Image (cartoon, grey):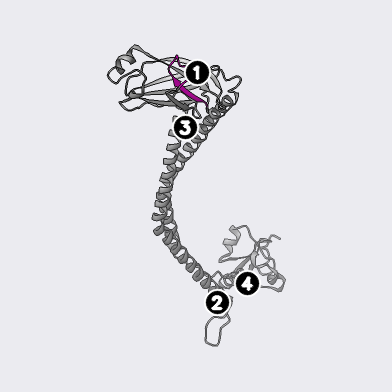
Amino acid sequence: MNERSDGTDSGPEANISERIDRIIALKKAENEQAIGRLDTVETSWQPVNSELSSQLNEEVSRSGDETESIARAKLSLERNLFTEVATDAVGIAGKVIDRESKAGLPGLNVRMAPPRADTAKIAYLAEAKTDRYGNFNIVLAVKDLPGVSAERLVETARAGAQMRFDVLSPRDELVYSETVTLTAEAGRVQPVTLAVSAADKLAGALEYAKSVRASIEADEQLVARRTANMTAAVDAFQRLPETMLLRIADLKEELSVPPPKIAVAIPVESATAAAVQATRYLGNANTHELHDLENEKPECLISRIRWDHRVPFETEQQAVDAGYDYCAYCFPKGKSKR
């Protein structure tokens, strides 16, 4: 064994111990830093969680608004949603559609007049323009209805009042006219549907109407997928905080475990030499030959036996039971079978 002047061990085992101590100290410092970072994550998780939760709730709310908007748009494709009017007025919930495809035609002017009005000198009572769904709304005050007083409005409505509806193209060309019997009472809304042929002058309006329907259908699919994704995200997020905090706790517990005590391993050669010194009999694992170290002969060639082939035995019987044969030089003649 090598010793320093101060009596301490200066052999390879001491160097290994020092390196192990440095590694353990470094690892401990790294673990403490990691625990500190986990503490930061743990304490800051709540505000982060609140912010993410707020954002998700906003997205879910927005998705719900979009779904409701799409549903309303789909209804508007089929009918006019105008339903309320003042108690001193009469409402018309109108819709101009293509006679063949039933698509609502946008951008058309609709004018209302008494049925016998002279077209050249007509004074229209009201005018409206169809929206992207082909819908138009007209509100007439009771006092403005020709020849109808407020007292007689209900009686007149029951009897039926005829009105002419003229449909004009975006270029203000008359393309359709129809006389409709109105039965709406004051404070009520009556639906009116005008079916026209859009084959010629209204072809552009019909093409746009078809694109509106296709756009709503595409938006409906998109919103449905987005809603499904948001629902899945909310479900996952609701499980995330608990899972995250439990995982942080597990990691901190693992990092808090102190490093194991590491004993310096004696090199193979030293271990074998020590064992050889403590025992009398040495086996050669390569040749399965047993030697008596107290009667060693030059012919035994023990120095040539590799250290990883040297097997110490306390008794001859242990070696024999392990399948070893006696050396013909260091044991009495007749014992060896070689």
| Sequence-first tag of 1 and 2 | 2
Residue carrying label 2: 14
Q: Residue furthest top?
A: 159
Q: Earlier in the sequence, mark 3 or mark 4?
A: 3
For the point 33% across and 14% down, the residue is: 156
Q: Residue furthest front?
A: 121
Total labels: the figure holds: 4
First in sequence: mark 2 vs mark 4: 2
Q: In the rendered image, which quarter contains the N terminus?
A: bottom right
Q: CA distance from mark 1 to mark 2?
A: 116 Å
Q: Nearer the viewer, residue 238 or 69?
A: 69
Q: Nearer the viewer, mark 3 or mark 2?
A: 3
Amino acid at the residue labelled 2: Ala
Circle 1: residue type? Thr
Spatial CA span between label 3 and label 4: 98 Å
Q: Find residue 296 and name its label.
A: none
- Which residue occupies 53% across, 17% down? 99
Identify the residue position indicated by label 4 in the image: 293
Q: Nearer the viewer, residue 108 or 174?
A: 174
What residue is drawn where x is 32% and y is 28%?
86
Question: Which amino acid, by three-letter code, is at mark 3?
Answer: Ile
Q: Secondary structure at mark 1?
A: helix
Q: Tag on residue 70?
A: 3
- Residue 3 falls left or right of residue 82: right
Whether tag 3 and tag 1 are in contact, CB under 8 A, the answer is no
Find residue 322 and report its horizontal and vertical position in percent.
60, 58
Inter-mark Cα distance, 3 to 1: 40 Å
Q: Is residue 115 part of the magenta span, yes or no? A: yes
Above or below for 57 versus 217: below
* Magenta-drawn segment: 108-122
Query: Marks 4 and 1: which is nearer the front?
Result: 1
